[in-house]
Image (cartoon, helix red, strand yellow):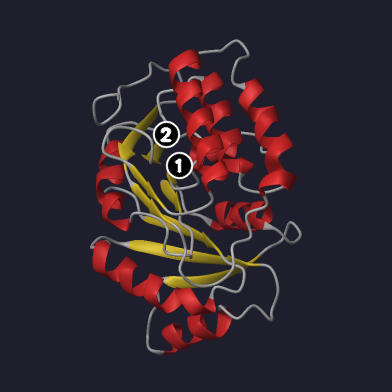
Amino acid sequence: MDKLLTIVIPVYNEGSNFERLWSEIEQHLDFPFTALVAYDFDGDDTLPVIEKICSQGETRLKLVKNSYGRGVVGAIRSGFDQAADGPVLVLMADLSDDLAQVGPMLDLYERGSHIVVGSRYMKGGRLIGGPRFKQALSRISGLTLCWFRGIPTHDATNAFKIYDRAMLHAIHIESKGGFELSLEITVKAFLAGYVISEIPSTWRDRTAGQSRFRLWKWLPNYLRWYLTAFRPRLPRRPMIASSASKS
């Protein structure tokens, strides 16, 4: 890989999960990376776990305090600001994301994709657990944006993505609420003609800690970016096919 992978991990009291997450990262990622853990407040119970890992000589793990105000959007954006040029992976600390797919996602990035989506809803992808209504909404939105708008992923709302750092710098991020940020970036990248691809991934609901996902609070923001996707495109680059056949 030509450029170092930056992993942005937003956390909010993920002390019960982080040590296991770090073990899985070390197991699945056999290439150079830097992990930026973005946190809101000094009393976050994730911080002592990270300090323990770093005290054992780990140099790839760094803390980044949210500089945009509390919340997952600010934490992720703070990580983006500190990321090196090249691929930037957003990874949840709740062990929900499919780390075995990071290597294949990087391959697609190296082949020219500006966004690589870990897709739960394409052929070969899976979603295990979680609230059924939330599942239904994300599945419907992802599939309809793919089928009826032509966005080349079945899972535009998933946060588990690799982004090109230069593309992130070029996109004006407006989200202030929550995980609709990932949909906003994908929609704006699509409308601007950036290259988007996807690969099957498995998502599993958390088994420890408390989710900060606020469906009803964030739903109007998701709807805003869903509707924005149907605006006219200004293509600059040819799109490429997914890494697997469309379902």
Q: Residue drawn at (66%, 47%), measured in percent from left and top?
A: 215
Q: Residue drawn at (62%, 41%), measured in percent from left and top?
A: 180
Residue type indicated by callout 1: Tyr
x, y percent for residue 224: 70, 28
x, y percent for residue 22: 38, 72
SS at mark 1 in the image: strand
Q: Residue drawn at (26%, 55%), measured in percent from left and top?
A: 100
Q: Is residue 101 left or right of residue 160?
A: left
x, y percent for residue 74: 68, 55
Front-most of 185 and 237?
185
Residue at image mark 1: 163
Query: Considering the image in quadrants, where does the C terminus appear?
Result: top left
SS at mark 2 in the image: loop
- Residue lying at the far front in this picture: please name it: 132
Query: Circles 2 and 1: CB distance less than 8 Å?
Result: yes
When the figure is inspected, residue 165 is found, relative to residue 144, above or below; the finding is below
Residue 114 marker: 2
